[in-house]
Amino acid sequence: MARASWLACIVLLLSLRASATWSNVQTWKSTTCTTTSNTCSQTLTSAATAGNVIVVLVSMNLNDTVSTVTDSGSSTYVLPGSCAMLEPTAPLFNMCAYTLSVVGGTTTVTATRGTSTTCTWFLRTAEFHSTATEAFDVAGATIASTATTSPVGPALTLTGTNDLVVHSIRTSSPSAISGGYTFTSFTQGAAGYLLNTSTAPTPTWTTTSAKAAMVGIAFSETGGVQQPVINVITENRPPQ
């Protein structure tokens, strides 16, 4: 029998961890809350997608706090103490909250402040999506206790390598933010976000001369996207 040699290809499907991607699903929506009420609700532009991150910002001209954030889907919200700041002399209060996994179909977000029933206050929300599993990374807060046209936000040191970073300011007439953040202005405030970053540039805001309360928060990813990779191994069998 003639000797034959043949080539066998063994195809192995391996798993490669690819870079995940953050994206903005719903941009900031701002609601001016009822001055005489200690609760404020906002209807989202579109129903939220299950598993996405909702970032909530609340600010007011008052020495008060926010006690709870809830939504119509019964998602769980976290109010990190490191993401709340009071400038006591103006006064100006600014804070953030978040859910890492919003319940699909959620349409309304509600914030409850202390016992105050005076002073204008504001509720802002945005929705973000990651192709990996989201996690809280770090938060910070700071104030400008004297009037300035260039208040500097909190410095955030990231532990993640591909983060979503959000900064917010409560002040008069902000018009810009440095550091490459996507800027959105509101009545008596503004926000900026940065997607898919390993660093969080400390932002300088451009405002009219005023005091300010500023917060920042970052979210990391705990897993990557699984993509198949084909590894071809060749084997020369002995003659038969």
Image (spheres, rainbow, N blue to C red):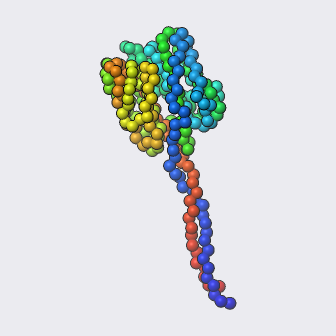
Instruction: State whether residue 94 appears in this view.
Output: no
Q: Can you say which quadrant of the picture contains the C terminus?
A: bottom right
Against 55, residue 120 (above or below) is above
- Residue 189, relative to residue 47: is it above or below? above
Identify which residue is drawn at 57% across, 62% down: 230
Name which residue lies at 61% across and 35% down. 49
- Judge by depth and name the residue closer to the eye, 30 or 3: 30
Which image quadrant for residue 215? Answer: top left
Q: Is residue 43 visible?
A: yes
User: Is residue 33 toward the left or the right of residue 140 in the image?
Assistant: right
Residue at image position (64%, 34%) is 104
Q: Residue at x 65, y 89 (%)?
A: 2
Q: Is residue 9 left or right of residue 212?
A: right
Name the image quarter holding the N terminus. Answer: bottom right
Q: Position of residue 226 (x, y in %)?
A: 57, 52
Task: Give how far across and how far down residue 121 sits, in percent.
Answer: 49, 16
Picture coordinates of residue 161, whole percent (x, y): 45, 44
Number of residue marks: 0
Q: Is residue 81 left or right of residue 142?
A: right
Residue 119 is situated, as x and y percent measured from the top left of the image, at 48, 11
Q: Residue most toward the right?
A: 1
Q: In this orientation, which residue lies closer to the viewer: 142 or 29?
A: 29
Answer with the quarter of the image where residue 7 lies: bottom right
